[in-house]
Amino acid sequence: MIRTHYLSAARTGLDLLAHDAVAASWTEPSALEGFTVGGLAAHLAQQITTVAAALDADHAGKEVVELFAHYDRAAWLGTDIDDDYNTAIRAGGEQGAEAGHAAVLADAATAFATLTAALPARPPGTLSGHARWPYAMALSNLLRTRILELVVHADDLAVSVRVATPDFDEGPFEIAGVILTRLAARRHGQAALVRALARSERAPTTISGL
């Protein structure tokens, strides 16, 4: 089921990437400081293309971590925009954007087609991970991390080009919500989360999980 949810989220992200407003605003600043629209769009596309690349990567000998252990090790989580890791993420997006909207969209569409055919055939317990990570994780957990990225950055991109943020199917949106909720509670405490969601009169200023 997680594979179906990932493909659904990737399809939603791909549809947004194809929007004329994204192409028209490619070189303009995005809603995220330091990213152009093109750089942000390329970063969104990478949540599809890197998964396709991960299917054929060699993860032998790597430590296998669980989902939230990945976030414990995430160098970007909760850091400043000028942190080296965040700067590298933006640079990677901007480098990808240099190919132009049509090429970024075509690469993402090709990767999506590959994943649509390949993911259902992968056996349970398959290991995967991002090529630059020093550890591996279950393919199912890698897909969960990419669903979160797709949901969050789809909003960033939609706001950047002044179109409606796309609605994701319930399954992938719930997965993103669970991860964000868990990260928010770990970062701000359970009480802050409860107040933000249920008691507006004493809600904290932020409960951002990221």
Image: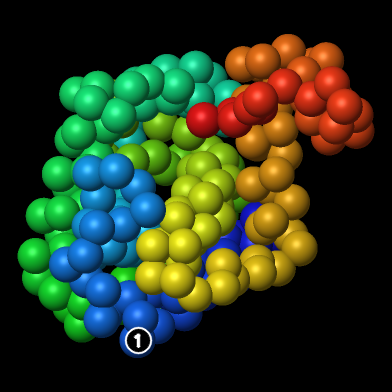
- Quarter holding the N terminus? bottom right
- Quadrant of the rendered structure where residue 88 is? top left
**83 relative to 42, above or below:** above
Q: Secondary structure at mark 1?
A: helix
- Residue under the point 64% across and 36% down: 180
Q: How is the image coloured?
A: rainbow
Taking 83 as reference, is 153 left or right?
right
Which of the pair 167/50 is nearer the observer? 167
Q: Amino acid at mark 1?
A: Asp
One can see residue 4 in this view: no
**13 relative to 76, above or below:** below
- Residue under the point 59% across and 29% down: 209
**Residue sticking out furthest to the front:** 201
Residue on which disc 1 sits: 20
- Quadrant of the rendered structure where residue 190 is? top right
Taking 181 as reference, is 191 left or right?
right
Taking 1 as reference, is 19 left or right?
left
Taking 109 as reference, is 194 left or right?
right
- Residue under the point 42% across and 42% down: 128
Q: Residues within 10 Å of mark 1 (few under 14, many from 20)?
A: few
One can see residue 88 in this view: yes
Residue 114, x across and y down, in percent = 38, 74
- Residue under the point 62% across and 16% down: 187
